[in-house]
Image (tube, helix red, strand yellow):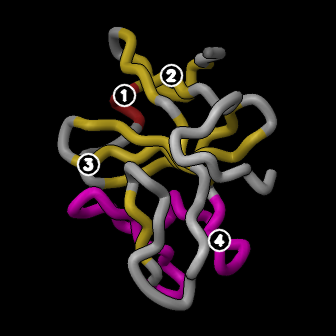
C-alpha cells in the first residue's frame, strides 16, 4: 500500500468533510464521529465536490442534488445518483490522516 499524508486530523471537523489532493486524485476526507473515511471527491451523478456536503450517519450528501453516499462502501442511497464512488483505505498516524489512492476498498475505479 502507498499511503500518503492527506491532511491533519484537526483539519476535518466532526461530522464534516474536506477536499484534498492525494497523488493525482481529488479526495474527500470525511469524519463521522471519531472515524475517518476517504472517497473520490466527485459525485457519480454530476461533477460536484462531495466534500462540500454534510456528513451524518456514515453518509455524505451531495449538496447539489441530494444523493447520499455510504462512507464505507461508496454506494448511493437514492436518486439521482445510481453509481457508487471509489472509497480508499485510511490510516490515522498520530495527528495526521493518510490515504492510499493506489487501491480502492470497493473496487470502483476512480474517474480522475
| Residue 57 drawn at (x, y percent) | 21, 62
Residue 60 on the magenta span:
yes
Q: Which residue is mark 4?
A: 44
Q: Are marks 1 and 3 in contact (CB under 8 Å)?
A: no
Find numbered disc 4 in the image and state the secondary structure of the residue it sits on: loop
Q: Which mark is residue 32?
A: 3
Cα distance, mark 2 to mark 3? 16 Å
Q: Which label's residue is closer to the chain start, 4 or 2?
A: 4
| Drawn side of residue 21 relative to residue 64, left or right | right
Q: Residue at x 60, y 39 (%)?
A: 104
Q: Which label's residue is closer to the chain start, 2 or 3?
A: 3
Q: Residue at x 42, y 18 (%)?
A: 96
| Drawn side of residue 7 relative to residue 34, left or right | right
Find numbered disc 2 in the image and state the secondary structure of the residue it sits on: strand
Find numbered disc 1 in the image and state the secondary structure of the residue it sits on: helix
Q: Which label's residue is closer to the chain start, 4 or 3?
A: 3
Compared with 45, 26 (above or below) is above
Q: Which residue is mark 2?
A: 98
Label total for image: 4
Q: Which residue is mark 1?
A: 9
Circle 3: is it few (<14), some (14-19), or many (20+) Cα within 10 Å? many
Circle 2: is it few (<14), some (14-19), or many (20+) Cα within 10 Å? many
Q: Which mark is residue 72?
A: none
Cα distance, mark 4 to mark 3? 21 Å
Question: Which image quadrant: the N terminus?
Answer: top right
Find numbered disc 3 in the image and state the secondary structure of the residue it sits on: strand
Amino acid at each position: 500500500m502507498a499511503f500518503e499524508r492527506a491532511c491533519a486530523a484537526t483539519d476535518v471537523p466532526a461530522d464534516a468533510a474536506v477536499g484534498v489532493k492525494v497523488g493525482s486524485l481529488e479526495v474527500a476526507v470525511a469524519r463521522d464521529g471519531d472515524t475517518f473515511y476517504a472517497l473520490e471527491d466527485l459525485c457519480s451523478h454530476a461533477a460536484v465536490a462531495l466534500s462540500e456536503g454534510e456528513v451524518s450517519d456514515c453518509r455524505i450528501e451531495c449538496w447539489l442534488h441530494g444523493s447520499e453516499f455510504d462512507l464505507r462502501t461508496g454506494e448511493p442511497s437514492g436518486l439521482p445518483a445510481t453509481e457508487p464512488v471509489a472509497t480508499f483505505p485510511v490510516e490515522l498516524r498520530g495527528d495526521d490522516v493518510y490515504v492510499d489512492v493506489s487501491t480502492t476498498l470497493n473496487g470502483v475505479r476512480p474517474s480522475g
